[in-house]
Amino acid sequence: MKEIKQMSVPQLEELAAKIRERILDVVSRHGGHLSSTLGATDLIVAMHYVFDVEKDPFIFDVSHQAYAHKLLTDRWDAFETLRQFGGISGYTKPSESPYDYYVAGHSSTSVSLAVGAAKAIKLRGEEGRRIPVAMIGDGAMSAGMVYEALNELGDRKYPAVIILNDNEMSIAKPIGAISRILSQAMAGPFYQRFKERTEKMLEHLPESARYVAKRMEEGIRMITPGILFEEMGLEYIGPVDGHNIEQLIETLKMAKELQKPVIVHAQTTKGKGYEIAEGYYEHWHGVGPFDKVTGKSLKKGSRPSATQVFSDKLCELACKDEKIVGVTAAMPSGTGMKQLMEKFPERFWDVGIAEQHAVTSMGPLAKEGYKPFVAIYSTFLQRGYDQVIHDIALMNLPVAFAIDRAGIVGEDGETHQGAFDISYLRAIPNMTLFAPRDDATLELAVEYAGSFPTPCAFRYPRGAMMLENGSYPATPFELGKAEYLEKEGEILLIGYGNGVGRAVAVREYLKNSGINAAVLDLRFVKPIDVEALEMAAKRFQHWFVFSDGAKMGGVASAIAESLMPETLKSILLHSFEYDDKFIPHGNTKKVEESMELLPEQIKEKIVSIVKG
């Protein structure tokens, strides 16, 4: 790690190429984030050369682009275990390495973290010896939190270096050599002295002369692409070539020496070094295993994903009803909104990494008579929680939330598991929560949401539904009504959403152990079918609850809260929901096995409970 500071530029370039090859090799076999991390490799090599990772806080926004950082900080061999259960995370994680300053899996937090780190450095009296350096992608700049942080940073003037990794859409059009020379000049001593002297001169000039001098200084800055940042009180350097290591080192050194808040605008190419993935191709952002030579995926899905089922059904409905509109936040392919945006570009929108804006912007559309669908991952909807409450539910507007990636999402781990949406949405007045059990009922859920008169949310997992389509007849949703799939049994298995599939699988295992179980698809967790539950209490003593969500505030809690006290005393309620801890990354089956949630494991527990 320390050897990097002794390397020549050609040696650093060779190192960057070696890092890219290592990333490509591991990701092609195990999957992971690819194009963004390949594009950031040269920047990270330059960061490690100029700054001291043992002292300076290295902060990566989202941190899916930080693979090179992991490889440069004693994880070259461990990189083989990337995103595997028990292996290293695909994101920065302080418990994994002291060189990972902060956990990061959600976007647009880096500048706030840099401000916080800069405040701590100042309070500790370490200014001039330590400086936070943060890397943020241009996509993350669409979130308002970034500007809240930049606003304070520009006002307080804490020393910090913010590297803007511009790899998709230029904030400013590059103007070649002139831009590069001008940018370096702006960071150099001449421009800085000129700027300081101009500011001092302005303080003592009469109003008329002050106006002329001020306009002259603004005129110089107007021909640079960083006027937005300059106006916020930040120094701006760029655009610079994000793949020219020599130039990056010179630029970062200048930014460090300024001891001010500085934006370094670096332009990079996604997928750099792997020609198949170079450029803006959303497919190469996050990938499963693939053939390095052809770029073709090695995994073949035999069943459609829940996302695809949702997308196809919503597209079908949108063709018939022009009042149906929709939004997603930077995940058009991941949420299935891409085909709708392509077919109906005036009615379906991607607003970038701006979940708060996405949610609130749909409120007026609902108020004006349209039917908005907000398609967002469970983990990302957390970022728009206040907006769900204040701008949708409080107004009781008919906005439908299609919650993708509900439950365990596998290799992305703690920051992305969809564990909390039932718990955090159930507490909101005017909100209705329901969930499909298979593909056919997911289609019915989309139809039901499309005509629902108040706020509602339905959830579905990453990948295919656990319950095979056609296992049970699909019946339309009826507000607050549960449905028995298997009526007879000694015990009752209650499933919600994808948890129904788990309940059905457990039932088959129990049959082999001599226990017959009834299965109730709860369908709605708010409002809950109190009548069906009260009747069930007269037939079954042991109830076992299955949902791919947190136990605290989850489905079993909703059931317990809905029952009469005397009813609750007559039953034994057992929850197989997620315990109160963050869920690690890894293959979903291995993660579930570690949590003892595989059907065969649950069967053993139930047999022990029932038979003693």
Image (cartoon, helix red, strand yellow):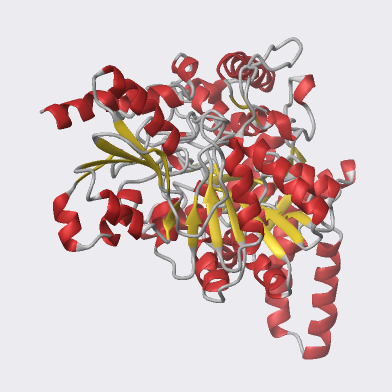
Residue at (71, 68) in percent of width and height: 231
Residue found at the far top of this picture: 293
Residue 353 in view here: no
Where residue 286 appears, x then y in whole percent? 63, 30
Residue found at the far bottom of this picture: 207
Where residue 345 appears, x then y in whole percent? 84, 53
Which is nearer the eye, 240 or 109?
109
Q: Is residue 510 left or right of residue 235?
A: left
Residue at (37, 33) in percent of width and height: 503
Quarter of the picture holding the C terminus: top left
Q: Is residue 173 left or right of residue 521?
A: right
Residue 187 in view here: yes
Where residue 474 appears, x then y in whole percent? 57, 40
Relative to 297, residue 173 above or below: below
Which is nearer the eye, 400 or 436?
436
Where residue 572 sits, quadrant-wise, is top left
Which is nearer the eye, 122 or 102?
102
Relative to 594, residue 181 above or below: below
Labels in figure, total: 0
Residue found at the far left of this picture: 612
Q: Is residue 221 left or right of residue 332?
A: right
Where residue 23 appears, x then y in whole percent? 60, 19
